[in-house]
Image (cartoon, rainbow, N blue to C red):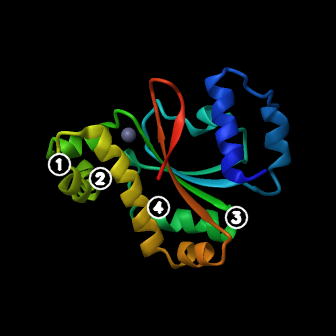
Amino acid sequence: MDELAKLLEGNKRFVNREFKSKDLSAQRSETISGQHPFVTIVSCSDSRVVPEYIFDAGIGELFIIRAAGNVVDSCALGSIEYGVGHLHTPLLVVLGHEKCGAVTAACKMLCENNHIDSVLEKIKPVVGKTGPSDVEKTIEENVRWVKDCIENSSKVVKEKVAEGKLTVVGLKYSLTTGKVEILK
Ligand SMILES: [Zn+2]
């Protein structure tokens, strides 16, 4: 099955509460010798956005990089390159979500003179384009922006895409419905 279809099928099971049965202990044993995830996901750290739950996945299936606002820095880019370059996941997803606190803070231009500012600095160029009043639109634009940043700054990602070995997709998760939608 196509990896994106597989991921969306998992989300459908989550929404319909039709979780597939998982033997986590067996999966743990099976993956000791190596991991073969089918997707690399850049997600927000938000505790309400739990990729393994919302995609009904088990151990060894999702390679996840998380930071508030699903922003990427050079360490995140390195992790993404490990996922697509070494683990060869054919799918790379940037996962934003409804009511994202980091994007909301960036829209409000809150400044804490703290390390959280480096997260907000990453989102500010997006707010510059969308304006501060429409947070949900900014969340969606931020996913597209992060996706573009990854594609433009990672040679590994660029090459894999050019070779037809990698698909990069932006998704938005709804806290309200539990569904993910593809952001074109
Ligand atoms: Zn968030």
- Label 3 neighbour load within 10 Å: few <14, some 14-19, many 20+: some
Which residue position holds label 1?
A: 131
Closer to the chain start, of discs 2 and 1, is 2
Q: Earlier in the sequence, mark 4 or mark 1?
A: 4
**Could you tell me the amino acid type at mark 1?**
Gly
Q: CA distance from mark 2 to mark 4?
A: 12 Å
Q: Which residue is mark 3?
A: 87
**Mark 4 residue's CB less than 8 Å from ligand 1:** no
* Label 4: which secondary element: helix
Image position of 162 (left or right of 70): right
Q: Amino acid at mark 4?
A: Ala
Which residue occupies 18% across, 56% down?
A: 128
Nearer mark to the viewer, of 2 and 1: 1
Amino acid tagged 2: Val
Q: Residues within 10 Å of mark 2 (few under 14, many from 20)?
A: many
User: Above or below — where is 102 with respect to 84?
Assistant: above
Q: Which residue is mark 4?
A: 76
> In terms of secondary structure, where does tag 3 sit?
loop
Q: Nearer the viewer, mark 1 or mark 3?
A: 1
Quick check: which quadrant has ligand 1?
A: top left
Residue 141: where, in percent of width, then height?
34, 52
Residue 104 in the image: x percent, y percent? Answer: 25, 39
Measured along the vertical axis of the image, is residue 93 above or below residue 100?
A: below
Secondary structure found at label 2: helix
Q: Residue at x 23, y 59 (%)?
A: 125
On residue 164, the disc is none
Q: Position of residue 119 (x, y in %)?
A: 29, 52
Whether residue 134 can be seen here? yes
Which residue is label 2 attached to?
119
**The residue under label 3 is which amino acid type?**
Leu
